[in-house]
Structure formats: structure tokens, C-alpha cells
Image (cartoon, rainbow, N blue to C red):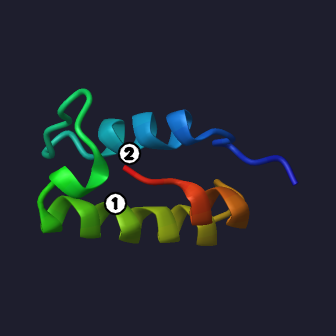
Amino acid sequence: MNYELKTIKQVRTQFWVEHPELTEVKGQRQNNYNTDTRCIFVDWVDSIRKNGRISEVLASNVTL
């Protein structure tokens, strides 16, 4: 299957593009973001996996 997003970096970049209301902090690790941002990310990853934009393996491995 040909997925739109193939790397963790592409997924992260696309997340920030699609969520301009959230603030990315360069060099910040996932657990440093507030709970709302982390939950939005997880829900978003699940939705793009279900829509076939990323693979199951990538969805399982990607972190903010």
C-alpha cells in the first residue's frame, strides 16, 4: 500500500501543520507537552491510520 506519510518526521511535521492552534517547541519531548496536546496527537494519529494515510507500524511507533 502507498501511504501518504512514511516517516516519523513527516507525521510530526504534518501534525503541526494541521494543528496551527497548538504550539510546537523545538527540542521538546512528548512528555513535556501538556495532556491536551498529547491527547490531540494520539487521536489524530489514530484517525490518519484509520484513513490509510500511515501504516499500522508507523502509527504504533510515532511519538510527538
Within 10 Å of disc 1 (Cα), the crowding (few <14, some 14-19, many 20+) is many
Q: Residue at x 52, y 34 (%)?
A: 9
Where residue 50 appears, as percent x and y from the top left, is: 61, 72
Up-down relation of residue 47 to residue 34 (above or below): below
Q: Disc 2 on helix, strand or loop?
A: helix
Q: Which amino acid does label 2 sit on?
A: Phe
Residue lying at the far right of the rendered structure: 1
Quadrant containing the N terminus in the rendered view: bottom right
- Quarter-of-image position of residue 35: bottom left
Where residue 31 appears, as percent x and y from the top left, is: 24, 57
Q: Which amino acid does label 1 sit on?
A: Phe
Up-down relation of residue 8 to residue 42 (above or below): above
Where residue 2 appears, as percent x and y from the top left, is: 83, 47
Q: Residue at x 15, y 66 (%)?
A: 36
Q: Residue at x 37, y 49 (%)?
A: 64
Answer with mark 2 or mark 1, whichever residue precedes in sequence: 2
Q: Disc 1 on helix, strand or loop?
A: helix
How far, Cα to Cα, is label 2 from label 1? 7 Å
Up-down relation of residue 38 to residue 23 (above or below): below
- Quarter-of-image position of residue 42: bottom left
Q: Residue at x 74, y 48 (%)?
A: 3
Find residue 3 and name its label.
none
Within 10 Å of disc 2 (Cα), the crowding (few <14, some 14-19, many 20+) is some
- Does 19 sit left or right of 10 as displayed? left
- Does 36 sit left or right of 48 as displayed? left
Residue at label 2? 15
Residue at label 1? 41
- Does 54 sit left or right of 25 as displayed? right
The answer to whether mark 2 and mark 1 are in CB contact below 8 A is: yes
In this view, the residue in front, 35 or 55, is 35
